[in-house]
Image (cartoon, rainbow, N blue to C red):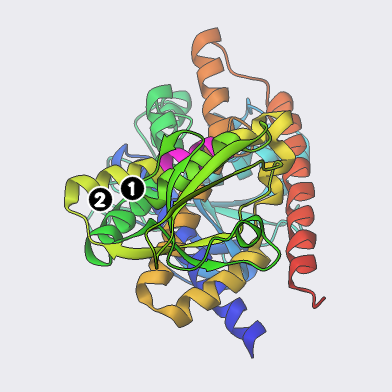
Amino acid sequence: MDALLSIFWGLVIFSFLVFIHEGGHYLAARMFGARVLEFFIGMPSKRQLSFVSKKNGTRFGITALLFGGYARIAGMDMGKPNPHLALALSLVNARGEISIKDTAHMMDVSVDEAAAALFNLESYGSIQLKSNSDPDLDQENTVYQSMARDEDANTIFDKGAKLNAKKATRAGEPFFSKLSGDEFLALERKKTYVGLSIPKRIIVLLAGIIVNLLFAYVVFVAVFMSQGLTVAENTVKDIAPDSIALEQGIDSGDTITEIGGTQITSGNDVLMALQSHRGKGSFEVSFTKKDTGEEKAFSTELATGENLGIMLESHQEKLGFADASNYALKNMVLTAKAIANLLNPQDFMDTVSNSSSVVGVAVLAKDAAQAGIWQLLTLAAAISLSLGLMNLLPIPPLDGGKVVIEIIQAISGKPVSQKVQVFVSMVGIVLFMLLFFFLVGQDIFRLLPR
């Protein structure tokens, strides 16, 4: 039962975070007039529940392959620049519908070249597959058809389309434009990701990350204001057995007053002072006895990773908006620094060893859900923050890696080769798959009984 609950709550959190992340891409693309063909929770799969929006043509749905999602923005599919797009677009619109085989014959190109051109046009939202056509089953006889268009050539994907007007055509009917083939293709390209200016492309790429970070910030602020911040005190709550603190006579209720010459007034002071002295030789700890008020002190030293063995008292302290906002931003900065360590070979393994995969997160999600809505929201915010910052890493196929490619193209004034983009993305995918399996194994090992 615990396993099922972990899977359920893990899916709930990940699906929600994927939804808001992809929602950021979707909204930014729509804001700039780019067509969005699909919006799905789950990875691409033929097993899906979906519907097509009557307002903007986007197919919304959920697939059987959860733990993922995507917004399919027109023109974002990777592929080689195709010289046959204008002619193929003219043929489909002139005929209303046409097979790949007939397209190849009329353009005097190979079936594969015709298929590539028609696929690119479909990824632009300029044409569509006819019902029951499947290129994977029968490529030559796969049929593409024209989109329903108004007299200005707008489709259902475009803002302001008037598809109910008298001069509008239906899907599969011939559409004749006053524009030349190249002009018509240029008009269609403007309504895609590749037709946007580079600054707008970068905003589309960063929009998902921005939404993830904004969600985390809002939740953290709300939690700090309504539930309060757990503030550690410098009073000892409990002592670990066989610890330095126990050997030196520290008892529950005693107060830590000084560490290594630093005056201590809070639990945070204790943690910071101990951290600064780990692995750096001996230092003195002063404390006040609860019962007698007697001041005592002892010298000790801590190896890296070693602790005094004390648990501190704490209390909840509700914050005003300014303080809550400040603490939220500090948490976000600390998380950003931790994730940045993935790019530092010296800190890489330490960061990975303190990370969790979907397995560990699912267990945490179940525990948080059982603890209450605020705990669940806090966990969701922490994961959203991590996902957003991870996506910012300059490694394709992450959003940050795509932004780097766009910046390189802007500086060089020419597009990065599709072969280079595919190769770099494949390397990135392999590296992240290795990291994924390592983290899963690490989480399973942690969960095994000992």
State which region is magenta.
Answer: 332-339
Q: In this view, does 412 lie above or below 24?
A: above
| Residue ID at (43%, 30%) | 201
Q: Quadrant of residue 244?
A: bottom right
| Residue ID at (37%, 36%) | 177
* Residue at numbered disc 1: 328
Q: Quadrant of residue 220?
A: bottom left
Q: Where is residue 448 in the image (x, y as percent from the top left)?
A: 79, 74
Quadrant of image for the C terminus = bottom right
The amino acid beneath tag 2 is Ala
In magenta segment, residue 336: yes
Q: Of helix, strand and loop, which one carries label 1?
A: helix
The amino acid beneath tag 1 is Ala
* Furthest-top residue in this view: 412
**389, 52: nearer the viewer:** 389
In magenta segment, residue 34: no
| Residue ID at (29%, 48%) | 150
Q: Give the class, few, some or many, for how many residues have Cα within 10 Å of label 2's Cα (few <14, many ≥20).
A: many
- Whether residue 79 is visible to the viewer of this picture, yes or no, is no
**182, 59: nearer the viewer:** 59
Quadrant of image for the N terminus = bottom right
Instruction: Determine contact: label 1, label 2, CB under 8 Å.
Output: yes
* Residue at numbered disc 2: 324
- Residue 105 in the figure: left or right of residue 87: right
- Whether residue 164 is visible to the viewer of this picture, yes or no, is yes
Calculate the distance from the C-alpha at mark 1 to the C-alpha at mark 2: 6 Å
Q: In which quarter of the image is residue 372?
A: bottom left
Q: Of helix, strand and loop, which one carries label 2?
A: helix
